[in-house]
Image (tube, helix red, strand yellow):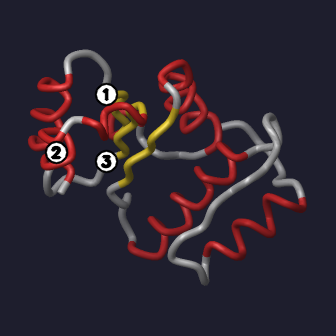
Amino acid sequence: MIDFKLMKHQQDALWKSQFEKDLFLAFEMGTGKTCVTIQMIRARSAERGRLCKTLILAPLIVLKNWKKEIGMFSSIDLKQVFVLEGPIAKRAAFVTSQIGYSSVLITNYDALQNKDFVAALK
């Protein structure tokens, strides 16, 4: 994990996330949405004493970048972070197999258009 300091707007968002169930980060591109989101996952997981089940939806082009940055900005074991790509049936089967396990699942928005994938998430 690299040593870093959150910028003021990131610190504010992290603080607000303690009190808000739903939070939309509308930062400009390149201003640290990914990093602060990872810090939110860390904080929630620390509260519970375990990694929280997490679903990250992102553009297809940045899926692998999310996993890389989770490794850079947290101590989350990357064996618990999964980038879901490829056939949607394969993704849905993987999600179903992860029920009951603390993990971070990363996939693209388009996956939500498939009813089998959404059912697996539920």
Residue ID for mark 3: 103
Mark 2 or mark 1, which has the lower sequence index? 1
Q: Residues within 10 Å of mark 1 (few under 14, many from 20)?
A: many
Residue ID for mark 1: 84
Q: Residue at x 38, y 58 (%)?
A: 51
| Local SS, label 3 | loop
Alpha carbon distance from label 3 to label 2: 8 Å
Residue 60 located left or right of residue 95: right
Residue 6 located left or right of residue 1: right
* Tag 3 near tag 2, CB within 8 Å: yes
Quadrant position of residue 122: bottom left
Residue 1: assigned label: none
Question: x and y percent of residue 58 in the render?
Answer: 50, 35
Q: Residue at x 58, y 79 (%)?
A: 20
Q: Residues within 10 Å of mark 3 (few under 14, many from 20)?
A: many
Quadrant position of residue 31: top right
| Local SS, label 2 | loop
Mark 3 or mark 1, which has the lower sequence index? 1
Q: Nearer the viewer, mark 3 or mark 1?
A: 1
Question: Is residue 14 shown above or below 36?
Answer: below
Question: Is residue 8 shown above or below 18?
Answer: above
Q: Residue at x 80, y 69 (%)?
A: 12
Residue 52 located left or right of residue 71: left
Question: x and y percent of residue 7 in the render?
Answer: 88, 54
Residue ID for mark 2: 98
Question: x and y percent of residue 103 in the render?
Answer: 31, 47
Mark 3 or mark 2, which has the lower sequence index? 2
Circle count: 3
| Local SS, label 1 | loop
Q: Residues within 10 Å of mark 2 (few under 14, many from 20)?
A: some
Q: Amino acid at mark 1?
A: Leu
Q: Amino acid at mark 3?
A: Ser
